[in-house]
Image (cartoon, rainbow, N blue to C red):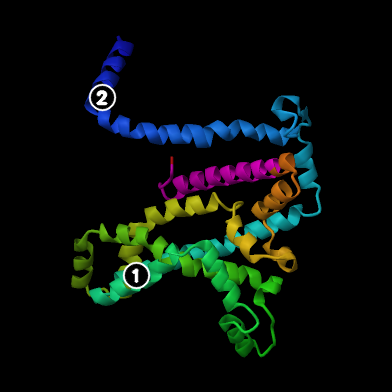
Amino acid sequence: MEIVRKKQIIKKDLKKNWFVYLLAIPVVAWFLVFCYGPMWGVLIAFKDYKPLLGFAESDWVGFKHFVDFFQGPYFWRVIKNTLLLNVWGIVFGFTAPIILALMLNEIRDGKFKKSVQTITYMPHFISLVVVCGIIHIFTADEGVVTQLIQWITGQEYTSLLGYSSFFRPIYTFSGIWQNIGWDSIIYLAAMSSIDPALYEAADIDGVGRIKKMWYITLPQITPIIVILFIFAIGGLMASGHEKIILLYNPLTYDTADVIASYVYRRGLREASLSFSTAVGLFSAVVNFALLWATNRIARRTSEVSLW
C-alpha cells in the first residue's frame, strides 16, 4: 500500500509540474554528458596511458603516478604555493566584497551609489587576457605600479613580474580589483531583504551606524557569508590556472607555480597524461575533503551548512 501511495504522489506531482521537469531535462542532460560522463577518464591516473593503445591496452600501474608526485622535487612547492595563493585570496579577496557591500549599503545618495557600483562592476566583464595585459603594462619597467613601488621603497626595480616576492600581491589584488564589485552583489541582495523594522528600532534606541552595521547587518547576512566561505575553503587546492599561466614565468616559479599550472605543463607540454591526471585527482579529493570538513564544522557551530 505504501508503494502504491508513493507512485500516486509521484504521478500527481509529474502531472502538476510537468513543465518544470521539462525545463530541467537539458540541465540534467548537460551534467550527465559533460560532468559525469567523462569521470571514467580518471582511470588514466592508474594506468600508463598511451593514446595509441587506448584505455583497454594501456598498462595498469596502480598508484605509481601518485607516488611519483608525492616524492617528486616539486610536490611541496606546488602544494605550498597553491595553499598560500588561496589563503591570500580568502583573507583579502573574500573579505573585500563584504566590506564594499557594507559601505555601499550605508550610502544614501542614490546617484553616487549607482556610480560606485557601475565602476566596481565593470572590471569583471573585461577579458582575462586583457586584464593580464594591463597587469603586464602596469608592472613593466616604466609602469605605473612599478614607479609607485620604487617611490615607496626607494629601490630600483625592473618588471615586477620578474620578482617572485611580488607575484602573490599582484595576483591577489588584481583579482580583487577585477571581482570585488561583482562579488558584492550577493551581499547587497541579502542586505536588501533585512527587515527595516530592525533599523527603525535601533534608531529609536539611539544606536549609531557603525553599531547597526555590526549588530544588525552583519548577523543578518552571516548565513550567506558562511555558505560562500564553505565554497572558498572547498577550493583551497584549486587556483585559476589561466591567469597564473598568463602572468608567471620561470623566474617566479618559486611562488607562482601551483597544482593547476604544474598539471598544465606536465600534461600538455610534456604529454604526461597519466601523471597530470593523478595530480588533478589528488587535488580534487583534497578539495572534497576540505569542503566536507568545513561544512560539518559550520553546521555544528552556526547551524548553517550546504547539507
Q: Position of residue 6 (x, y in %)?
A: 30, 17
Is label 1 in contact with label 2 (beta carbons under 8 Å)? no
Q: Which residue bears the numbered disc 2?
A: 13
Q: Position of residue 114 (x, y in %)?
A: 29, 71
Q: Earlier in the sequence, mark 1 or mark 2?
A: 2
Q: CA distance from mark 1 to mark 2?
A: 43 Å
233 or 304: which is nearer to us?
Answer: 233
- Is 50 situated left or right of 218 in this image? right
In this image, 112 relative to 40: left or right? left
Can you tell which quarter of the image residue 106 is in?
bottom left
In the figure, 50 relative to 180: above or below? Answer: above
In the image, is 95 to the left or to the right of 161? left
Q: Amino acid at mark 1?
A: Thr
Front position in the image: 285 or 42: 42
x 59%, y 57%: residue: 242
Q: Is residue 92 visible?
A: no
Is 227 contained in the magenta span?
A: no
Image quadrant containing the N terminus: top left
Mark 2, secondary structure of its residue: helix
Q: Residue at x 30, y 11 (%)?
A: 4
Q: Main SS type for the magenta part? A: helix
Q: Which residue is mark 1?
A: 118
Q: Is residue 75 visible?
A: yes
Number of the front mark, 1 or 2: 1
Name the residue located 30 percent from the left edge and 61 percent from the top edge.
191
